[in-house]
Image (cartoon, rainbow, N blue to C red):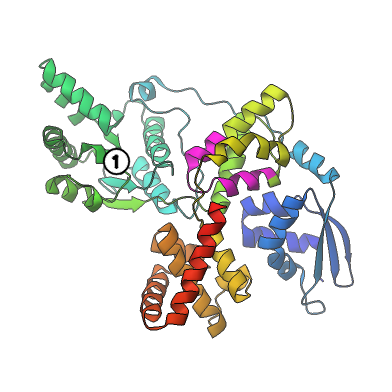
Amino acid sequence: MRSWQHAQNTLREVLGEGSYDTWIKPLRMTVLEDGRVSFDVPSKFFRDWVEERYLDALRNALADEANPQPEVTLNINGSVQGELFEHARKPRKRERPQTTAARLANLVPRYTFENFVVGSSNQLAHAAARAIAGNPGEVYNPVFIYGTTGVGKTHLVNAIGHFVFDRDPAAKVVYLSSEAFVNEMISALRHHRMDEFKKRFRKVDVLIVDDVQFLAGRERTQEEFFHTFNTLHEARRQIVLTSDKFPKDIPELEERLRNRFEWGLTVDIQAPDIETRLAIVQQKAEAEGFSISPDVAAYVADQVANNVRELEGALTRLGAHASLKKTEVTLEFAQEVLQPLLGRRPRLPTIDDVQRTVCEHFGLTLTELKSKRRTQNLVVPRMIAMFLTRKLINLSFPVIGEQFGGRDHSTVIHAQTTITQRQAADPALRSTIERLERSVTSQRAS
């Protein structure tokens, strides 16, 4: 059996720094002999999480020719919890001072690239944002970022503005919501100041407009925005837009605007996966200045699955209650404090729910489901899981492929097409998929 040090290095490379630091680094090895290894863990929640998601990876990292399937045991030891709390205590990060230019541009101080957590759900949008921030008006123009409420669109576009100011304090950046754009235009019309209004928005280096779907149905505003867009685009000034919908799906949006919104790069942000949510929880706790153990982080990340804003709100609530009561944030404390918040929120399915349900039904491990193997007993369950992920969560094809072992989006499209055709001709398969769908959705409703 390989040494624990060797296994740790392998696990760090395979799982990534975030998962390794949260779930592997805290393990306290107590036995390593004769094909058997034992670890102490801080709680039942921590043990169950590691067993469900990382046990196969642990065995593989420890295995050698003499012991191809080492026996791994996780034992609950409460004393480890104290060590984790000490490790988790970090000083509150000071928010960097905001420049006068950033204040005038209405940028949110805390929304920077430094504290934006990148995951598979937002990786492309983040890369595009970094590219245009470093070279406004030259790479993609416009950039249109869309996604449901609370997934990080506003954070990302504010980060662009801050980055531009960091490189050029004299840059002219304007950030505002489409509602603010409408209100400013109405005020300008009422007070006969349209020339000032046009000058403000048509002389900027970077124009960032949030929630452009609210321009829909406003003919006069759309006309003014159309001319503003054209002026900036012709001058190679950067335009950044966000919406909760793809341009073609925004009702009552003029075709000429819809067409221009699609001129550059259109990219979506999906709800964050479990690893990204864990990273967000840990970062937010650090920023709030309180300690949080891995089992608490996992509980919060699992319970608040579809909205970064709600995730941050849950951490703020935890931090405030812990500060008022002068207590550590244990799992029991977190469950008590967040119960009123979670009780009011419908729990939507996540990709973890789909994968876990499919694995249980077909008797597979998560590692097998995501593996590169293409045996019949794996291919069909894998395609079913991809199909259900698309249907129940509506993630993009590239994101789904990434979550199933880094597969290409064409593989996901093939799975979608194949399962759609097969279930139409095979009542047994259709019944299995319906049963799996009910199982996934009932988990989140319970």
Asked whether 264 falls inside the magenta stretch, the response is: no
Where disc 1 sits, the SS reads strand
- Decide if residue 230 is on the left or right side of residue 279: left
Label 1 crowd bin: few (<14), some (14–19), many (20+), radius 10 Å: many
- Decide if residue 344 is on the left or right side of residue 102: right
**Percent x, y for residue 15?**
63, 59
Please, what is the dominant secondary structure of the magenta stretch? helix
Q: Is residue 384 above or below residue 394?
A: below
- Decide if residue 414 is on the left or right side of residue 328: left
Q: Residue furthest top?
A: 191
**Percent x, y for residue 12?**
67, 58
Asked whether 310 falls inside the magenta stretch, the response is: yes
Q: Is residue 446 above or below residue 371?
A: above
**Percent x, y for residue 84?**
76, 42
* Whether residue 25 is visible: no
Q: Which of the two residues, 29 or 53, is positioned nearer the viewer here?
A: 53
The amino acid sitting under disc 1 is Val
| Residue range highlighted in magenta | 296-314
At horizontal 72% and vertical 67% (from top left) the residue drawn is 61
* Whether residue 342 is visible: yes
At horizontal 29% and vertical 41% (from top left) the residue drawn is 241
**Percent x, y for residue 291?**
69, 35
Q: Which of the two residues, 191 or 352, is positioned nearer the viewer here?
A: 352
Q: Is residue 361 above or below residue 276?
A: below
At horizontal 78% and vertical 53% (from top left) the residue drawn is 27
Quarter of the figure with the N terminus: bottom right
Number of numbered discs: 1
For disc 1, the marked residue is 240
